[in-house]
Image (tube, rainbow, N blue to C red):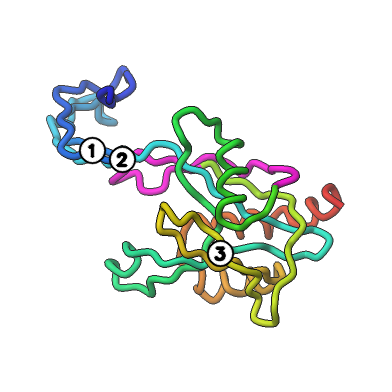
């Protein structure tokens, strides 16, 4: 694999990069200086950076039924943080090297919900944990036809066996999802951002997508 570098920036001088671990992602130890706000040079500092790269997240929305499609799955880092490890989330995943973000968004939605996306509505591209990782996430709202669900909101199961995914698909009214957000039940930051975006654009999307 090629070494992961740091893009050039006129205010930053990279003195050394050491890759201390590499799997699907990489952990690097980087020594650098940068220009401070007052013009003086800051550093040299050494920082560990997790190089995760590009990711996407998709919140499927059915404007006719006014329902959203969410997923539930186990997250070990949530348990490590002392939180409930089964999270309610939007479909999400890393972008493969050869993919563009919209292609990845459609793929992840199909893998994690079983749904085909009709239209993607970009929300924005965001840094998730800028103090730790270079990971960015491109967030989308997606036009779908929501599947039928039982009285408990469960519409089936999805996920890839070779990635050890065990995903439960939920279909709930948009107002229920917004209530979960307001009650603090949604602790995944990306999912919270997606629901805030949908709440702000919901009436417009219902007019445009219907």
> Does the magenta-highlighted stretch encompass residue 133?
yes
Tell me: residue 154, above or below residue 167: below
* Residue placed most toward the observer, 41 or 15: 15
Q: How many marks?
A: 3
Q: Which residues are magenta?
A: 117-137
**x then y, percent, for residue 107:** 58, 43
Task: Identify the residue at image location x=66%, y=76%.
Answer: 153
Looking at the rendering, which quadrant does residue 114 occupy?
bottom right
| Marks 3 and 2, how far apart at CA | 24 Å
Looking at the rendering, which quadrant does residue 202 occupy?
bottom right
Quadrant holding the N terminus = top left
Give the number of the disc on residue 71.
3
**Which residue in the structure is indicated by mark 2?**
25
Task: Identify the residue at image location x=32%, y=18%.
Answer: 8
**Which residue in the structure is indicated by mark 1?**
22
Ranked by sequence position, the earlier of labels 3 and 2 is 2
Tell me: residue 141, above or below residue 181: above
Task: Identify the residue at image location x=31%, y=37%.
Answer: 51
Left or right side of 189 for 90? right
User: Do residues under tags 1 and 2 come within 8 Å of each other at their CB atoms?
Assistant: yes
Looking at the rendering, which quadrant does residue 49 occupy?
top left
Mark 3 packing: few (<14 Cα in 10 Å), some, or many (20+)?
many
* Residue placed most toward the observer, 107 or 19: 107
Q: Secondary structure at mark 2?
A: loop
**x then y, percent, for residue 75:** 38, 64
* Residue placed most toward the observer, 84 or 22: 22
**x then y, percent, for residue 24:** 32, 40
**x then y, percent, for residue 73:** 46, 66
């Amino acid at each position: 694999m090629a070494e992961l570098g740091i893009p050039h920036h006129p205010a930053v001088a990279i003195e050394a990069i050491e890759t201390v671990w590499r799997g699907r992602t990489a952990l690097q130890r980087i020594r650098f200086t940068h220009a401070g706000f007052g013009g003086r040079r800051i550093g040299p500092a050494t920082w560990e950076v997790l190089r995760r790269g590009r990711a996407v997240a998709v919140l499927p929305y059915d404007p006719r039924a006014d329902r959203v499609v969410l997923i539930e799955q186990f997250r070990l880092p949530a348990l490590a943080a002392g939180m409930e490890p089964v999270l309610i989330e939007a479909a999400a995943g890393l972008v493969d090297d050869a993919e563009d973000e919209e292609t990845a968004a459609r793929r992840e939605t199909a893998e994690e919900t079983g749904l085909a996306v009709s239209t993607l509505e970009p929300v924005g591209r965001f840094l998730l944990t800028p103090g730790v990782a270079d990971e960015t996430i491109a967030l989308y709202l997606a036009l779908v036809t929501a599947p039928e669900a039982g009285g408990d909101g469960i519409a089936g199961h999805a996920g890839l066996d070779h990635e050890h995914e065990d995903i439960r698909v939920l279909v709930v009214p948009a107002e229920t999802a917004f209530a979960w957000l307001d009650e603090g039940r949604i602790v995944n930051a990306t999912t919270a951002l997606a629901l805030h975006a949908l709440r702000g654009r919901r009436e417009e999307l219902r007019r445009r997508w219907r």
